[in-house]
């Protein structure tokens, strides 16, 4: 025995809603499926390492210390920019980076390594190009002081150590060389 179709006003509305729902689902389900496949397969282009310093999708805190850098050009302070070594597209953090303009260098890597001022300057130049710094480094004498003591050798080879004050002096020296890591700086 066949069932008689309900032709009431309410039944017609239900049939129309069901038909619309089937059409919407026929569009929505494939779009979601395509989105999931693309999300699973998409890998952003890898970011090139700079002087051996990798760029990670998030901060790596296995080895996490800080140094402080002051830069002087002909005796005048030169601000260390915020976001050196931090990229937004693709989002990543180089193992050597800054967050703010306070001169604190964040040294964050998968393992304890030796990092140098030269590596930091290379990351600086390639992620926040500073033509003034580049030009001055290329044309003037350069000295580095670590905790107030003049370092010997090439400035690029000066190691960045936990809670050290590094003063990069380009050209004429300032009247006072900083000699201590800032008391308000992060620990380590």
Image (spheres, rainbow, N blue to C red):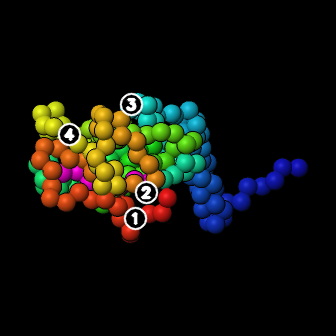
Q: Residues within 10 Å of mark 4 (few under 14, many from 20)?
A: some
CA gap between label 3 and label 2 equals 23 Å
Whether residue 44 appears in this view of the structure is yes
Sequence-wise, which precedes: disc 4 or disc 2? 4
Residue tagged by mark 4?
A: 142
User: Quick check: 163 left or right of 33?
Assistant: left
User: Quick check: 63 left or right of 157?
Assistant: right
CA gap between label 1 and label 3 equals 26 Å
65 w.r.t. 133: above or below: below
98 w.r.t. 122: above or below: below
Q: Are marks 1 and 2 in contact (CB under 8 Å)?
A: yes
Taking the spot 35% from the left edge, 64% from the top edge, the residue there is 182
Residue tagged by mark 2?
A: 163
Q: Using the rendered view, name the quadrant where residue 35 is placed.
A: top right
Sequence-wise, which precedes: disc 3 or disc 2? 3
Of residue 84 and residue 70, the one placed in the foreground of this image is 70
Sequence-wise, which precedes: disc 3 or disc 4? 3
Q: Position of residue 79 (x, y in %)?
A: 21, 55
Residue tagged by mark 3?
A: 51
Q: Furthest-bottom residue in view?
A: 184
Residue tagged by mark 1?
A: 185
CA gap between label 4 and label 2 equals 22 Å
Taking the spot 60% from the left edge, 44% from the top edge, the residue there is 29
Q: Residues within 10 Å of mark 3 (few under 14, many from 20)?
A: few
Q: Using the rendered view, name the quadrant where residue 128 is placed.
A: top left
């Amino acid at each position: 025995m066949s069932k008689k179709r309900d032709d009431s006003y309410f039944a017609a509305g239900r049939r129309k809603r069901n038909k619309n729902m089937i059409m919407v689902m026929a569009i929505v389900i494939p779009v979601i499926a395509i989105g999931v496949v693309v999300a699973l397969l998409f890998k952003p282009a890898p970011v090139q390492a700079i002087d051996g310093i990798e760029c990670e999708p998030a901060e790596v805190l296995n080895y996490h210390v800080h140094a402080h850098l002051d830069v002087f050009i002909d005796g005048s302070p030169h601000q260390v920019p915020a976001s050196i070594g931090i990229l937004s597209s693709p989002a990543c953090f180089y193992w050597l980076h800054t967050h703010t303009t306070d001169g604190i260098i964040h040294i964050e890597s998968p393992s304890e390594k030796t990092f140098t001022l030269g590596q930091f300057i290379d990351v600086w130049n390639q992620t926040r190009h500073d033509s003034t710094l580049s030009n001055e480094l290329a044309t003037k004498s350069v000295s580095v002081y670590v905790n107030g003591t003049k370092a010997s050798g090439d400035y690029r080879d000066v190691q960045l150590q936990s809670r050290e004050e590094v003063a990069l002096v380009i050209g004429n020296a300032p009247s006072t060389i900083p000699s201590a890591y800032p008391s308000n700086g992060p620990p380590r």
